[in-house]
Image (cartoon, rainbow, N blue to C red):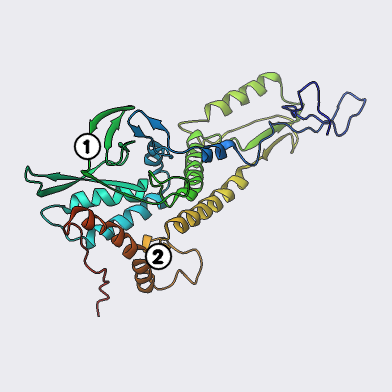
Amino acid sequence: MTKNKKYGGARPLADVSPAATTESAGRVEAFTFGDPVSVLDSREIFDCFECWRVGDWYEPPVDLAGLAKSFTASVHHSSAILFKVNILTSTFKPSAILSREDFKRLALDHLTFGNCYAEARRSATNRLLKIKPALAKYTRRGVEDGRYFFVTNGQASYEFEPGSVWHMLEPDVNQELYGVPQYLSALQSAWLNESATLFRRRYYKNGSHAGFIMYMTDTANSQEDVDGLRRALRESKGPGNFRNLFMYAPGGKKDGIQILPVSEIAAKDEFFNIKAATRDDVLAAHRVPPQLLGIVPSNSGGFGAIVPAANVFARHEIAPLQAQFEAINEWAGEQVISFEPYNLSTGE
């Protein structure tokens, strides 16, 4: 394959290819524009690295601040996480060592970041007094085994007592130091859902909608009339939009002024399709039945009975999570976490 010497083998930024040309004054051209975009981006390079070492601790493989911001990116994303947290908290048995509020923080951190940290606070005689959660967003695992740091603004503001932190993580296929959330594959869908909502909101707030072309061919209009019409359209945008516009053209023809819509109808249709598709992706990643989140079905058949769906969800999602949290009992040397059975009251 020969290389283009002018561009060093790379494709030009704009590929202009005239399709039809006439020698008259009105020349018609068709061209394509835009930079070439690779189907596979450069994120695969991060698979070559392990967790980045910063002094005495390792940095997580995923940006935890980005995960925290993405928590509210999609209503279905945050709702599915909080739904699991509420069920775990409602079945948890609080004790003098670990309160219900502290356990809820552990569950929220684990389901959001794929990591949760519990600090054991002991007496002078090494008796366990309290289990307190350490914020997973700022807790870092030390280079030496058993050391953990509380890091803010890139600096360690506090080091936990060695051996006093219990770390529960979701296993990652690339490294063993930190966990990654199971919903990671659905983040693109959650972000697309957010982008569609923000675009729709700006679409209505703007008022002009950028969705039409005003085409004028009537020779009866003077330049002053055109300028006046331009000012009237410009003032109709933003606050106070959707105003009526009066246009008087003496001697004008029927098609002298035309409104040609560009993408208004297509944008409306794609909005609902994007919202539905991204919702399904997010719920599939969280493995939460839609009827448990109060989603209204769009088909006549619905989603099925809610009680069997809740029982299956409890067996395949809640029970494994409860078993993961009960692993702290072996680490602490006594029973710290226990759960009640997840039972549904059917009213019978």
Q: Which residue is mark 1?
A: 160
Residue 112, x across and y down, in percent? 36, 47
Q: Nearer the viewer, mark 1 or mark 2?
A: 1
Q: Quadrant of residue 159?
A: top left
**x, y (%) of residue 188?**
51, 45
Q: Measure how far apart labels 1 and 2 are at the Cα level.
A: 43 Å
Mark 2 falls on what kind of element? helix
Which residue occupies 58% across, 49% down? 270
Disc number placed over residue 291 in the picture, else none = 2
Residue 292 seen in this snapshot: yes
Taking the view exactly as shown, the residue that stands out farthest to the front is: 144
Q: What residue lies at 13% left-to-right and 48% top-to-bottom?
A: 130
- Residue furthest to the right in view is 23
Residue drawn at 81 percent across, 26 percent down: 4
Residue 72 in view of the camera = no
Q: Residue 113: percent from the left, percent from the top?
A: 36, 45
Question: Label 2 amino acid?
Answer: Gln
Amino acid identity at mark 1 = Phe
Residue, far top? 224
Location of residue 40 with respect to 320 vertically, above or below: above
Q: Is residue 164 left or right of residue 193?
A: left
Q: Which secondary structure, mark 1?
A: loop
Residue under the point 55% across and 34% down: 208
